[in-house]
Every structure is written in structure tokens, then in C-alpha cells.
Image (cartoon, rainbow, N blue to C red):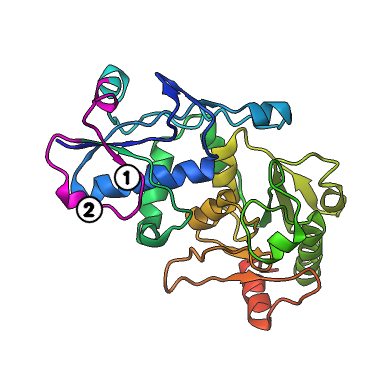
Amino acid sequence: MTYIYPQFSDFELPGVRLAGPGLGNLLFIYFGAWQAAKEHGYEMIWPTWFSVKPGAILRREKDLRFYGDLFRNRAGYVDGLQKQRLIRRRNAIRVNKKQFDFSAVGDGAVILYSAFQMRFGSLVPYAEEIRAEIVRNLSRKSARGLEGDMSRCVNIHVRLGDFAVNQDALKAGKNNTQIPVGWYAAIVLKLKELLGGDVVFNVFSDGTDEQLAELLRLEGVRRVFFGNSLADILALSRAPLMIASGSSFSMWARFLGQCCSISYPAQIKERVLKPGADGFEIECAADGDLPAAVKEHIRKLYPL
């Protein structure tokens, strides 16, 4: 048997990591390993989710992103003492690039997989299976993201936190850049004019109420939090339409929900709908107009 371990950090003790990337980026590593296991018959080793992130603590964020409460190993992947023995083998194979020849790996090897690329690419055909993999390993707390009716909601993701404020970088499509809260408010107003007053707009964000004031003061807009990062991704994914940030968090919600989405110019990063899907992924400026075909599609998503 050959084993593969999604390795989230180089600095790891049994049961805990020091720092490391955010949840969206961790999911890219996890499902890169999961895809390799699926396609080559490897045995998965359960990753170390729990981490300590001083930045989130210092910023007093609502979700401190420890990630220890996201999942439970309900799939029965290798864990515990056997996990520790395997991942500490001196001859373990370290894979930190997406382009790797797995056919050259011999039986009985242990692969430490840390390859990261903020692209779905070959994962797109597995969208339903990936969602099922997440759902079967949910903690009870994360499962809150599956509760409630989202059919008359538009979900909004506003990523602020540690993202930089740089309008030039934003217009150039750079990563980790804040989108102005006023843009979200402008898109909400366009949709309210199109749909009327019974659609609810849910705001998911790591920002403060003060930072989000321009958006939250609009009628029909409310702030929501489902308990942790994963629950929020799942809840975000369940509305017919999403107003997205440019973060990997938004990308995962769009991918898992296969939902329609509106993004800031140059911030889609990647189109994640499966080929032939009945939906749209568009960019729209605050002072722009939604295409006529998109307006018609939105009306069908939210019939009167």
C-alpha cells in the first residue's frame, strides 16, 4: 500500500500546526492529495487541521481560524500513532509541485503532498464527489452550514482581514487585495431593483461592522455567521447567486455550489462551473450594467 499525506505546514507537532495558509488554500492541498489517492489507489492519511494563527488573534477576528473544529475523520483515513510513524519516515517522498510523475512511486511509499496551486483545473469534473467528501467528514459544528433555506437569498462574501488596500493592484487582478465595500453595495442595489423586496442578502465577512457599514445599512441586508470557516463556505455555496470576493474562500463556495456569481472586474481568477452548466460567472463594475441575458437568468433564479 502507498500512502499520501496532505501536508499543510512544515512546522508541525502531533495534533497541531504553527501558522500556515487559510482554509481555501488548505482545501487545494487536501484535494490535490485526494485526487492522487483516487486516481492511483493510494491510502489517505488524515491531515493536521488545527493551527495557531497569531494574526487572527491580534485582529480579534470573529473566526480565529484555528480550524480544529472543521472536520472529523469519518472516512476512516489513517490517523493516530500510525499516521505519526508514516509521516516521519526518513525516506518519505516530498511533493511540492503539481507536475509530478506519480507512476514512478513504488508500492509502500509515503508521499508528503504540499503542492499548491490556486486553480481547480482537473478538479472540476469531480465537483460533486468533492462536495460529498467534505460533507461526510464534517464536524457537527461545520454541518450548520447545511441548515436553512437559501432559495430566496443572495449570498455575499466580503474578504477584508489581512488583505491589502491597493486599487492599482486590484484593477490588475492581483491576489490578496481588498475590494471596496461600496462595490458590494452597488451590486446589491442593482439586484434589489431587478428582484424587488423579498430577497434576503446575507453578508459573510471577516471585517468589522464599521468596515461593512455602507453595505449593512441597506434594507434587506444582514450579516450572518454559521460558526466556523467551513460552515460559512458551505452556507455561501447554497444560494442561487453569489456576490464574490477574489479570495480562494469565495472560489471554493462558487465551486462547491456550482452557483451563479458576480465578481469585481479582474477578480474572477478562474471560472469554476462545469462545462455545459446552466449558469453564469461574470464581472461587473459598480457603475456598469448587468447584461440583459444575465438579468433574465437572475429573474428565473428568483421567480416572483
Magenta portion: prevailing SS class? loop
Q: Quadrant of residue 45?
A: top left
Q: Which amino acid does label 1 sit on?
A: Trp
Residue 108 tag number: none
Instruction: Name the element at disc 1.
Output: helix
Instruction: Name the element at disc 2.
Output: loop
Relative to the observer, which residue lies in front, 91 or 252?
A: 91
**Picture quarter with the N terminus:** top left
Instruction: Using residue 239 as the reference point, say whether residue 252 is left or right of it.
Output: left
Q: Where is residue 141 in the image (x, y as percent from the top left)?
A: 54, 30
Taking the view exactly as shown, the residue that stands out farthest to the bottom is 292
Q: Name the residue under label 1.
A: 34
Neighbor class of circle 1 (other Cα within 10 Å; few <14, some 14-19, many 20+) is many
Q: What residue type is labelled 2?
A: Asp
Question: Is 302 part of what is drawn in magenta?
Answer: no
The residue at the point 31 percent across, 19 percent down is: 80
Q: In which quarter of the image is residue 148?
A: top right
Q: Name the residue under label 2.
A: 101
The part of the chain drawn in magenta is 85-109
